[in-house]
Image (tube, rainbow, N blue to C red):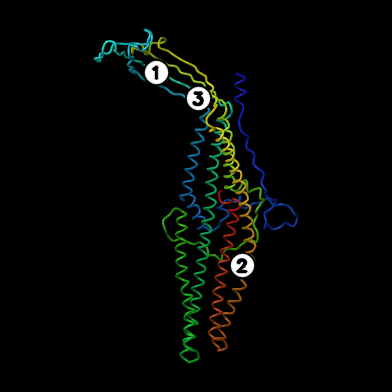
Amino acid sequence: MAVCLTISSCKVGRDYTRPATALADTFRGTSKRPDSTIDTANIAVIPWSDFFTDRMLMTLIDSAIANNYDMQAALKNIEIAHQTLKQSKAAFFPEINTQLGGTNHQWRSRDFFASPSSGWYERGGHGEPPEQLYMYQSQYLSSISLSWEMDIWGRMRRQNERALAEYLQSFEARKAIQTQLVAAIAEGYYNLLMLDAQLEVAQRNLRLNDSTLQIVKLQRDAGEVSSLALQQTESQKLVAASLIPELEQEIAIQENALMALTGAMPDSVYRSSALMDWRMQDSYDTGVPLQLLTNRPDVRQAEQALRAANAEVGVAQAYRYPSLTIDATGGLNAMLPHNWFNIPGALFGGLISSATQPIFNRRRLKTQHEIAKLERDKAEIAFQQTVMEAAHEVSNALVMINKLNEQYTIAEQRVATAQLGVKNANLLFKSGEATYLEVITAQSNALTSELDLVRIKQQQLVAKVSLYRALGGGWK
């Protein structure tokens, strides 16, 4: 017994240890602290319901988490993995079967060896010659059997370890989907606000162009300008007018896209804020790169896949070693029906223990073991790649936030200068000191600069969301 316990404590394969990562102490693009200390505060730990403040945006995210089809499929995957985990845990228990049957006829020839005590026989009258008469035997059986395989090399423990890792992996997959979903909803909503702002700019510019056109018409009628001036002014107005249906089309498509993410049919989306109402921070708490290993669901998912692959190596290795199985059977057995439940006469039982050692199986088990080790190496590569990509995403988002802040400052100056140019051009045009071409050019510059300002504001908000998602925020 002591030997069996000692053997059963063995476990093939190596226990999982997290491989070393090449993460730095800080993210590239992080603002340097004057005291040279590392700030571990991280916006990723903020729940999405606190990170986002727009009421409609929060409603859309909440609806998407509850109704999005990818989220629903992820929940089903968790349930599937849970069932597999339950089955893996049950492998440690013996397998028990029962059997109940009777009147199982077996016809045998006279030449078949049978002693008088081996069964109950009668002559069969099937028309055969006497020397070929058949005998039949009836059996009545009720039994219970037990089969238990001892986990000598820890194969079942490794299988359970693999199932647990796959179960946790399905949880991380759902979290990863939610972080992507939250970010997609936020980006779509900010894009909708940008389109609204651009539509407002286009409509305001159209009204300005229409006012200029009326002045040019009066000047043409007075003979102060030619018909060419009127045609060019009308062309500028049509350019501004063409933006409106284009933006309205994009707005409708963006609204439908948001509805699709929430699992709803196409519909309009209410906006509880305007794009230019948002104010951006100069910097955000990013913590340290090592926190990606605990905050990023896709990193945790890749690590659980590595755990499962590592456990599979032990499973494949254990199949190459001997297995010990104990089988026990007991019940009632009789040839005559009235003796079926004659206790103790009909009682029978048996206990068998067997050890099986694979010797030659055309290299199948060795191949499976070698492939499992290679799959573990691949899983480690995938884990390292996921960590590296996560660090790159954070760094890229930080660079975007810093540079977009600079661009926004310049864009605000451009808008102020362009609007002043439009005002001055109109005054000079009305007094006859500027041509219609100067007015058109000023209005075109103002339209472009205002559209660029709106676009940069939207990119700032998207970069903020990208940083939040890249750090692992959105699943809490």
Q: Identify the residue shown where x is 62% and y is 23%.
A: 6
**Place of residue 363 in the rendered image (x, y in percent of width and height, measured from the top left):** 54, 32
**Real-space Cα separation, disc 3 to disc 2, in angstroms:** 69 Å
Amino acid at circle 2 = Tyr
Q: Residues within 10 Å of mark 2 (few under 14, many from 20)?
A: some
Q: Identify the residue shown where x is 52% and y is 46%.
A: 174
Residue most extreme to the top: 116
Residue most extreme to the bottom: 223
Residue 74 relative to residue 339: left or right: right
**Real-space Cα separation, disc 3 to disc 1, in angstroms:** 20 Å
- The N terminus lies in quadrant: top right
Residue under label 3:
94
Q: Residues within 10 Å of mark 3 (few under 14, many from 20)?
A: some
Q: Residues within 10 Å of mark 1 (few under 14, many from 20)?
A: some
Q: Which mark is residue 142?
A: 1
Residue under label 2:
408
User: From the viewer's perspective, is residue 424 above or below residue 28?
Assistant: below
Quadrant of res 360: top right
Q: Earlier in the sequence, mark 3 or mark 1?
A: 3
**Place of residue 391 in the rendered image (x, y in percent of width and height, measured from the top left):** 63, 52
Amino acid at circle 3 = Pro
- Of circles 1 and 2, the one toward us is 1
